[in-house]
Image (cartoon, rainbow, N blue to C red):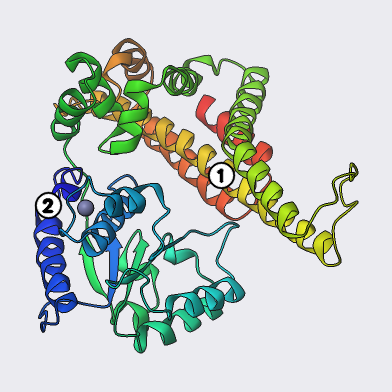
Amino acid sequence: MAVFDDLIGQDQAVAVLSRAAAAAGEVVEGGRGAGMTHAWLFTGPPGSGREHAARAFAAALLCPDGGCGHCDQCHQVFIGSHPDLESVRPEGLSYSVKQTRELILRAAGAPTQGRWRVILFEDADRATESAANALLKAIEEPPPRTVWLLCAPAPDDLMITIRSRCRVVNLTTPAAEAVAHVLATRDSVPPEVARFAARAAQGHVSRARALALDEGVRRRREAVLSIPRSLTGVGECVSAAERLVKTAEEEAAAATAMLNESETAELRKLYGEGSTGKGLNRGLVRGGAGALKELEDRQKSRATRIKRDSLDSALLELVSFYRDVLAMQFGAGVELANDDLRFDLDQLAKASTPEETLRRIDAIMQCRERLAANVNPQMAVEAMMLALRS
Ligand SMILES: [Zn+2]
């Protein structure tokens, strides 16, 4: 079906999902629909397109033609406005039990369009323990027309009790050639640029597309990958750390600004902001100020999460750089992720030993761990830069 066309290099998953969608169609027609399951778990490394695959499956379930890709139903699924698709992602660093309970209540309703009620739970591994327990109860006894689609990096990221009730769809990292081919044929990217973007993104389809089409994304990558050669002294290390953290902050601010504004406006409307109100809370009916404060807290923790994600992807880019250096030092004939920087890679490969390169990769991985453990970003990144230099 057309909705699965974008799942590059995922033939096995597509076969499973297509069969299940056909079975789901039978159920809607009053048949038995053998092979239809009420709880699914989409797993795969970052960039393998877990959420995208889950969304495509949702479209296949909700579209009267099994996922044609161009009808109203399909379109609504992809822009996120379908009344029978509830798409949730953690606004903060984790799902709270309160959020999960509200979701379960909504999930229990009958489908408005008579087909399915689909709950797409992104980053299900971020559910807190009590939230996961609430989720488990919902999955154990699903209403007849409710389908849960959970997404997580690996099956082990979920409690075994939840995992064992889900059918697992494992997605793999697509080959660079497959990604380049899609960029060239569907997004009309010149073949040369498509190959570069696919290689640099290491199988991450949406990242590859962003690199191919967005000049800003390419510039940020260049800035990150120019760091290794800039670390000539302690002062340079400190300023490189500052730059990296600041870039992540700016990215997070840009990604959240518009979202925050529309959420706040909506909430104000809900609580009946007075037409003369100019101050922050003036004119809101009782309870409005509290709700606004709650929204602001959620927005803050979302910004923190996006900032952390953006910093993490910059660190992974640095890892790919040093991996290329290591490959050159070992004379391994593998394709380099950062082939466009061959000159820099070659210089560093000659000026250092494989042991040093491994130690540098370790330093980056350690920095990632420290950031995940909430260490002050500037401090953690600074320590890493110093380790990369020496
Ligand atoms: Zn359709």
**Is there any visible trace of residue 220 in the rendered image?**
yes
From the image, tell me which residue sits under label 1.
306
| The quadrant where residue 385 appears | top right
Mark 1–mark 2 CB contact (< 8 Å) = no
Which tag, 1 or 2, sits closer to the chain's start? 2
Q: Is mark 1 within 8 Å of ligand 1?
A: no
Q: Position of residue 55 (x, y in %)?
A: 31, 55
From the image, tell me which residue sits under label 2.
1
Q: Nearer the viewer, residue 229 or 259?
A: 259
Real-space Cα distance between discs 1 and 2?
Answer: 33 Å
Q: Amino acid at mark 2?
A: Met
Q: Nearer the viewer, residue 321 or 212?
A: 212
> Dot 1: within a 10 Å radius of its alpha carbon, few (fewer than 14), some, or many (20 or more) residues?
many
Q: Is residue 228 above or below residue 129?
A: above
Q: Nearer the viewer, residue 383 or 78?
A: 78
Q: Residue at x 23, y 59 (%)?
A: 63
Q: Position of residue 111 (x, y in %)?
A: 36, 73
| The quadrant where residue 206 appears | top left
Q: Which mark is residue 15?
A: none
Q: Is residue 292 above or below residue 167?
A: above
Q: Residue at x 37, y 71 (%)?
A: 112
Q: Is residue 143 above or below residue 70?
A: below
Asked which secondary structure carries label 1, the reply is helix
> Dot 2: within a 10 Å radius of its alpha carbon, few (fewer than 14), some, or many (20 or more) residues?
some
| The quadrant where residue 246 appears | top right
Q: Amino acid at mark 1?
A: Ile
**Is there any visible trace of residue 354 in the rendered image?**
no
Q: Position of residue 261 (x, y in %)?
A: 67, 42
Name, please, the residue furthest toward the top: 343
Q: Residue at x 59, y 37 (%)?
A: 252
Q: Is residue 120 above or below residue 7?
A: below
